[in-house]
């Protein structure tokens, strides 16, 4: 097998530029000069006969051809790196930077309270956890893995379903003492203050639905507080500002100990899926596998609130 080392070097440079976002930042990572990085990319483009980057004074972004090439070669280089680690007896170590695109609800209520365990297990790992409203383009945005609620859109990503969580209609005891408890979901249409949550796609409040068996109906609720942050929405509900419709994942302990009251337990058949994504089609990097295992363990812990250490 005849492998051109200059081709492998050029591919490594391409990945560094794609992840760093500019030739200058990639040069710092690779311990090269920006002109050296530029020449390496130019040689690779000449070898392939396509333009891989759109260049400007502030950043460098992958072209469509560059995006396809990056998606194909990055998992192959990961495989080479891991094979080298195995050969050196170093495969048990997880090291480097892991960049995660994460849903705000899962990041705030499930991951953040438990991340110390993950970081303690892998002291040579740096975690870049970015809360995003949507999945976006995982590869071109430089993410290694994503955790998102909702049904997955068609893509070339590897997708694994983690769970379905139910939607809960709940309120704090202080709100119910002040405004009374609704007897039926339809009672929410008048006389109750509901905490509205903004859909990041439409910028309008999410509609409220109620599911029981095969029966589904919507209720046109109203409220003076419109929010786009899940942590703020949960805090507002706990403070008695209104009735909310959060996901059960992460708040089961609050429902059990009475901080929140499930208003319609008979109308709780609406489910919302959680998926994890990664771009490697052939080989999943060791660092990504370690994080995925941690996420699965976190979900298995379920509604058990982590105890202070």
Image (tube, helix red, strand yellow):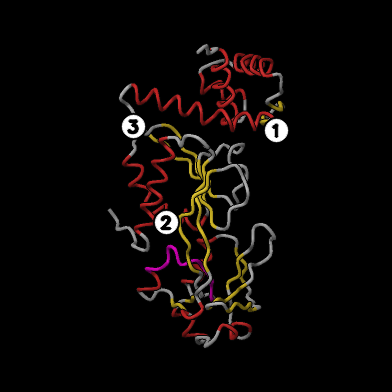
| Relative side of 96 to 146, left or right | left
- Residue 55, placed above or below residue 295: above
Check disc 1 and report the residue beneath it: 64
Mark 2 nearby-residue class (10 Å; few <14, some 14–19, many ≥20)? many
Q: Residue at x 51, y 79 (%)?
A: 267
Disc 1 and disc 3 in contact, CB within 8 angstroms: no
Residue 243 picture location, percent across and down: 53, 76
Please determine whether, in this image, residue 308 is positioned above or below residue 52.
Answer: below
Magenta stretch, residue numbers:
243-253
Residue ranking furthest to the front:
1
**Which callout, 2 or 3, points to the residue nearer the camera?**
3
Which residue matches tag 3? 93
**94 to the left or right of 138:** left
- Residue 111 vertical placement versus 57 (above, below): below
Does dot 3 land on a helix, a strand or a loop? Answer: loop
Residue at 51% x, 42% y: name it.
278
Q: Residue 244 colored magenta?
A: yes
Nearer the camera: disc 1 or disc 3: 1
Secondary structure mostly seen in magenta is loop
Nearest the viewer among 208 and 260 is 208
Report which residue position mark 2 lands on.
Answer: 110
Give x and y (percent) for residue 256.
Answer: 36, 73
């Amino acid at each position: 097998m005849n492998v051109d080392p200059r081709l492998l070097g050029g591919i490594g440079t391409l990945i560094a530029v794609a992840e760093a976002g500019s030739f200058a930042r990639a040069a710092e990572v690779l311990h090269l000069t920006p002109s050296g990085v530029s020449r390496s990319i130019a040689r690779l483009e000449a070898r392939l006969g396509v333009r891989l980057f759109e260049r400007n004074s502030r950043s460098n972004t992958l072209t469509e051809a560059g995006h396809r090439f990056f998606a194909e070669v990055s998992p192959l280089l990961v495989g080479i790196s891991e094979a080298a680690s195995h050969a050196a007896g170093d495969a048990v170590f997880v090291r480097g930077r892991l960049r995660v695109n994460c849903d705000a609800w899962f990041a705030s209520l499930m991951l953040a309270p438990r991340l110390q365990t993950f970081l303690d297990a892998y002291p040579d790992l740096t975690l870049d956890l970015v809360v995003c409203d949507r999945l976006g383009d995982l590869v071109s945005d430089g993410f290694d893995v994503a955790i998102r609620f909702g049904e997955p859109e068609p893509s070339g990503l590897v997708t694994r379903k983690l769970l379905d969580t139910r939607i809960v209609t709940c309120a704090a005891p202080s709100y119910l003492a002040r405004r009374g408890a609704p007897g039926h979901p339809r009672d929410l249409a008048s006389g109750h203050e509901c905490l509205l949550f903004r859909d990041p796609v439409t910028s309008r409040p999410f509609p409220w639905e109620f599911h029981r068996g095969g029966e589904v109906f919507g209720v046109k609720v109203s409220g003076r507080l419109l929010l786009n942050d899940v942590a703020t929405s949960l805090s507002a509900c706990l403070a008695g500002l209104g009735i909310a419709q959060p996901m059960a994942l992460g708040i089961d302990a609050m429902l059990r100990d009475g901080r929140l009251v499930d208003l319609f337990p008979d109308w709780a058949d609406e489910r919302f899926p959680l998926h994890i994504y990664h771009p490697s089609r052939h080989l999943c990097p060791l660092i990504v596998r370690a994080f995925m295992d941690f996420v699965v363990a976190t979900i298995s812990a379920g509604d058990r609130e982590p105890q202070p250490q």
